[in-house]
Amino acid sequence: MTEPATSLDPLVKWLGYAGLLPQLLAVAMLVDDASFRWIAIAGGYGYAAFIFSFLGGVWWGLALNAAPAPRWIYLAAVAPSLIALASYLPWTWGWDWPAPSLWILAIGLLLSPLVDRALGKTIALPNGWLRLRVHLSTGLGLLTAALAFA
């Protein structure tokens, strides 16, 4: 593994943490007014699914930028989108939704830094990357889990 070439720009950190705001808003809507329940849960589910899929794109980009990247990362990179799609299907078929689907996304988000950690053993990641990923995925994962309890 080579040494990280860069540190994270403070703007990256601020924008990353700001990315928790939509899910925080969804949880706050549940607490504030029960009449917003469906909007909060559906919006929170969609946001978690989008971000989980986005992580796959981030891993793909990191792998493409590395020389050489481990081959397993490409499989790991497409998994979040496929998992998010699979978690959406119960809703489209009228099955038990949203709690099981929210739990799938929450667990996926909470475990996702393990991919970054494994990737960091083979390619250089920016200084502070793993710490930021742990913070953001833990935050979004726990907020998504809170929606699953609703």
Image (cartoon, rainbow, N blue to C red):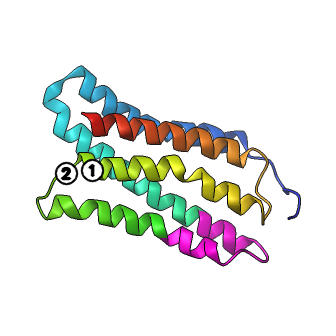
Give the CA separation, mark 1 to mark 2. Answer: 6 Å
Q: Which residue sits at x=65%, y=40%? A: 13
* Quadrant placement of the C terminus: top left
Residue 26 image offset from top left, x and y in percent: 32, 35
| Drawn side of residue 34 relative to residue 49, left or right | left
Please name the residue that numbered disc 1 is placed on: 100
Question: Neighbour class for label 1 at 10 Å: few (<14), some, many (≥20)?
Answer: some
Q: Secondary structure at mark 2?
A: loop
Q: Amino acid at mark 1?
A: Pro
| Drawn side of residue 115 relative to residue 128, left or right | left
Residue 42 has which mark?
Answer: none
Dominant secondary structure (helix, strand or loop) of the stretch shown in magenta: helix
Q: Which residue sits at x=28%, y=45%? A: 43
Residue 9 image offset from top left, x and y in percent: 73, 44
CB under 8 Å between discs 1 and 2:
yes
| Drawn side of residue 64 relative to residue 101, left or right | right
Residue 97 has which mark?
Answer: 2
- Is 24 a magenta residue? no
What's the magenta region?
Answer: 59-78
Q: Amino acid at mark 2?
A: Trp
| Residue 64 vs residue 96, the one in the foreground | 96
Question: Neighbour class for label 2 at 10 Å: few (<14), some, many (≥20)?
Answer: some
Quarter residue 24 falls in: top left
From the viewer's perspective, is residue 46 above or below residue 75?
Answer: above
What is the residue that sits farthest to the top in this orientation? 32
- Is 64 a magenta residue? yes
Residue 148 image offset from top left, x and y in percent: 29, 40
Residue 10 image offset from top left, x and y in percent: 71, 39
Q: Which residue sits at x=53%, y=39%? A: 138
Q: Which residue sits at x=32%, y=26%? A: 28
Q: Secondary structure at mark 1?
A: helix
Quarter residue 2 falls in: bottom right
